[in-house]
């Protein structure tokens, strides 16, 4: 593969002068161009795509043995900015700052942590809002359809570019967990361990259904204009509704009730009108409004489609057969109240792997936070991930010593 | 059951050399090298770690207590968070050489179901349990008229995780009536130290613990 990099060898972000404890401090996003023609990326659909720009961030130092690299895969609305801050005044740190940093689950004192925006995203990596090289105008829905496997192919291109022969681990929650599983299945010799969290091996009918309602909301927005809206107003109303639906699926009945109950929004009596009455309405609207500031509607369409197509069992007689190539040491973490990706589906993966004689551990964390628990139950996942990574690293080193 | 009660009941953390445990030592001797072993109620994974170290066994554990799971992860063991009362429905027939229930049989809701499941999944099933007919327990019941509380069964009746006590004679009778063969038996007078005997006189009176290796008839 020919690579053109806008930057040079991976260098860890310079520590900021005053770093809050446990933070990776100030970080810089990086970009690299991969799959330049004629070595385009061949997609599962058969289409070819190249060049592909990849936005990524790294935290911590790659060691001399190059065996301490961990790839973090983000979920639907995430991006490459997983930890630290881009500027001291940035209000929110990266999306998984609670788990990445010195002394945290993914300990940057020991590990070199990488996170990249996935293919078809809208946060620096090539996607439907990027210019089509043939026309110079945004792709829109002329962008080829992508799958989780294609996202992993792009990540593998990045790992090659960074000169990492074998990842110590690939980890992620939700759609990030799908990518972690896909890594272990499609590149078994490139990954020592995986940590799929609150995820599934194939999207259920219910999951597809929720995604489709979100997409229909976007299609129905007149501003969507068959995906060709980059010169004019964007389909904000549609995208906001899609996000509101998504948010309902990320919470649980209990957590929603605890958070909002039937509380009224800034009033003590009903208005008996269509104005916002309940806090939960206001919350969802706020989530929708926040989302449209930072997300591209066409990206949302492509990403949810990629999720729909995800099925590790495709073309295999059983889940177990489909996981036959998976050799990675696996830590699967589920959450009791997650009804979007129920713990039973994590258990099914764990059982299939055990049937294959793989090294697999299943941990179920009791939480009423629903699917969102994977971002909230930091203490629980940290207590499992740290010893798991320590053992994985020891095993990797022991095996390398044997093979030398 | 509280996590603390569970930990205390099943497998106290083995800070000291776990090979001092008679049940562990017997199993480490017994299990053939490279066996596949499933430990039901594996606690902190001390037994599985021994079997992996000494017999290169392929080990899996099932445990309900999250602290036990975390301890197992720290040892690099494969372990499943699960409830034994749900059985082993995701485990295939005869997929393990040994399925071990070390002091978990008395804690499950349906011991008969679990024993049947163990012999479906394992070629051999190993049971280790405190003998409720041990003389100390008999005398406590006889003279004090209270539920026995001692080193072997360190719980008051209202807080015990052991909901199905049994005796050596009960176990043998169960095997006779349920198509199970006893391949091997070990008796000991305490969990740590003391002699392990395969032919103790009057074990139903003298043994504090019994360990049986069984198979289907």
Image (cartoon, coloured by chain):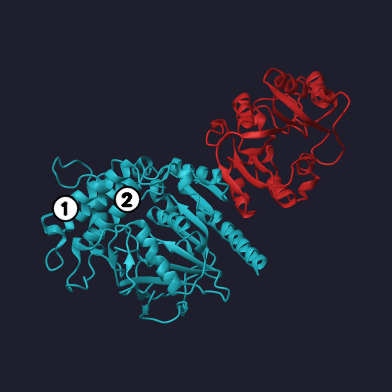
Chain colours: A cyan, B red
Q: Is residue A154 left or right of residue A402?
A: left
Q: Position of residue A157 (x, y in %)?
A: 40, 69
Label 2, secondary structure: give it.
helix
Any part of residue B209 in sight: no
How many numbered callouts?
Answer: 2
Chain of the residue under the numbered disc 2 shown in the image: A
Q: Earlier in the sequence, mark 1 or mark 2?
A: 1
Give me the C-alpha separation between circle 1 and circle 2.
19 Å
Placement of the C terminus of chain B among the 4 image quadrants: top right
The one nearer the camera, A329 or A336, is A329
The one nearer the camera, A282 or B23, is B23
Mark 2, Cα crowd under 10 Å, few <14 / some 14-19 / many 20+, is some
Placement of the N terminus of chain B among the 4 image quadrants: top right
Label 1, secondary structure: give it.
helix
Numbered circle sitting on residue A56: none
The quarter of the picture where residue A261 lies is top left
Do the residues under discs 1 and 2 have CB atoms within 8 angstroms? no
Q: Position of residue B19 (x, y in %)?
A: 79, 47
Look at mark 1 in the image and give the residue it sits on. Answer: A219
The reply to the same-chain question for discs 1 and 2 is yes
Q: Position of residue A58 (x, y in %)?
A: 44, 72
Any part of residue A73 in sight: yes
The quarter of the picture where residue B87 lies is top right
Point 84% across, 26% down: residue: B203
Q: With respect to residue A219, does B114 lie above or below?
A: above
Numbered circle sitting on residue A309: 2
Q: Nearer the viewer, mark 1 or mark 2?
A: 2
The quarter of the picture where residue B165 lies is top right
Chain of the residue under the numbered disc 1 shown in the image: A
Q: Position of residue B168 (x, y in %)?
A: 77, 24
């Amino acid at each position: 593969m020919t690579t053109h990099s806008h930057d040079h060898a991976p260098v860890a972000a310079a520590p900021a002068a005053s770093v809050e404890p446990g933070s990776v401090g100030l970080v810089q996003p990086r970009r690299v161009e991969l799959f330049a023609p004629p070595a385009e990326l061949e997609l599962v659909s058969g289409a070819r795509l190249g060049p592909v720009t990849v936005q990524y961030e790294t935290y911590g130092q790659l060691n001399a043995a190059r065996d301490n690299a961990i790839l973090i895969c983000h979920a639907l609305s995430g991006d490459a900015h997983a930890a630290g801050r881009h500027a001291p005044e940035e209000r929110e740190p990266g999306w998984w700052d609670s788990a990445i940093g010195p002394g945290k689950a993914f300990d940057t004192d020991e590990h070199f942590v990488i996170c990249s925006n996935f293919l078809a995203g809208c946060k620096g990596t090539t996607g439907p809002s990027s210019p089509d090289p043939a026309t110079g105008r945004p792709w829109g829905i002329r962008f080829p359809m992508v799958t989780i496997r294609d996202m992993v192919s792009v990540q593998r291109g990045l790992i090659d570019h960074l000169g990492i022969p074998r990842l110590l681990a690939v980890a992620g929650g939700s759609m990030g967990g799908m990518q972690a599983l896909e890594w272990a299945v499609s590149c078994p010799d490139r990954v020592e361990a995986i940590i799929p969290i609150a995820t599934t091996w194939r999207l259920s009918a219910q999951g597809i259904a929720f995604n489709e309602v979100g997409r229909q909301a976007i299609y129905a927005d007149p501003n969507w204009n068959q995906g060709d809206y980059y010169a004019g107003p964007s389909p904000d109303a549609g995208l906001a509704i899609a996000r509101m639906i998504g948010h309902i699926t990320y919470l649980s009945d209990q957590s929603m009730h605890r958070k909002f109950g039937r509380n009224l929004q800034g009033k003590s009596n009903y208005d008996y009108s269509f104005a916002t009455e309940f806090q939960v309405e206001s919350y969802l609207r706020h989530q929708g409004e926040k989302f449209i500031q930072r997300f591209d509607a066409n990206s949302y369409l492509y990403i949810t489609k990629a999720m729909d197509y995800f099925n590790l069992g495709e073309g295999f007689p059983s889940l177990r057969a489909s996981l036959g190539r998976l050799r990675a040491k696996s830590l699967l973490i589920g959450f009791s109240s997650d009804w979007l990706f129920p713990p039973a589906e994590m258990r099914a993966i764990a059982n299939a792997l055990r049937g294959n004689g793989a090294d697999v551990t299943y941990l179920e964390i009791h939480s009423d936070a629903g699917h969102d628990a994977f971002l909230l139950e930091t203490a629980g996942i940290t207590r499992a991930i740290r010893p798991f990574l320590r053992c994985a690293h020891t095993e990797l080193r022991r095996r390398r010593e044997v093979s030398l | 059951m509280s996590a603390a009660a569970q930990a205390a009941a099943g497998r106290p953390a083995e800070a000291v050399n776990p090979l001092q445990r008679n049940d562990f030592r017997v199993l480490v001797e017994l299990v053939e090298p490279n066996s596949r072993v499933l430990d039901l109620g594996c606690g902190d994974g001390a037994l599985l770690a021994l079997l992996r170290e000494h017999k290169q066994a392929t080990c899996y554990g099932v445990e309900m207590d999250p602290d036990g799971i975390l301890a197992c992860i720290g040892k690099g063991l494969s372990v499943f968070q699960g409830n034994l009362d749900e059985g082993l429905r995701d485990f295939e027939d005869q997929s393990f050489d040994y399925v071990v229930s070390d002091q978990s049989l008395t804690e499950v809701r349906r011991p008969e179901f679990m024993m049947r499941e163990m012999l479906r999944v394992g070629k051999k099933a190993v049971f280790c349990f405190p003998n409720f007919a041990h003389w100390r327990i008999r005398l406590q019941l006889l003279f004090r008229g209270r539920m026995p509380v001692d080193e072997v069964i360190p719980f008051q009746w209202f807080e015990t995780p052991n909901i199905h006590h049994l005796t050596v004679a009960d176990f043998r009778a169960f095997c006779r009536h349920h198509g199970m063969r006893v391949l091997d038996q070990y008796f000991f007078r305490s969990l740590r130290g003391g002699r392990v005997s395969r032919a103790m006189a009057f074990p139903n009176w003298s043994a504090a613990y019994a360990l049986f290796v069984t198979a289907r008839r």
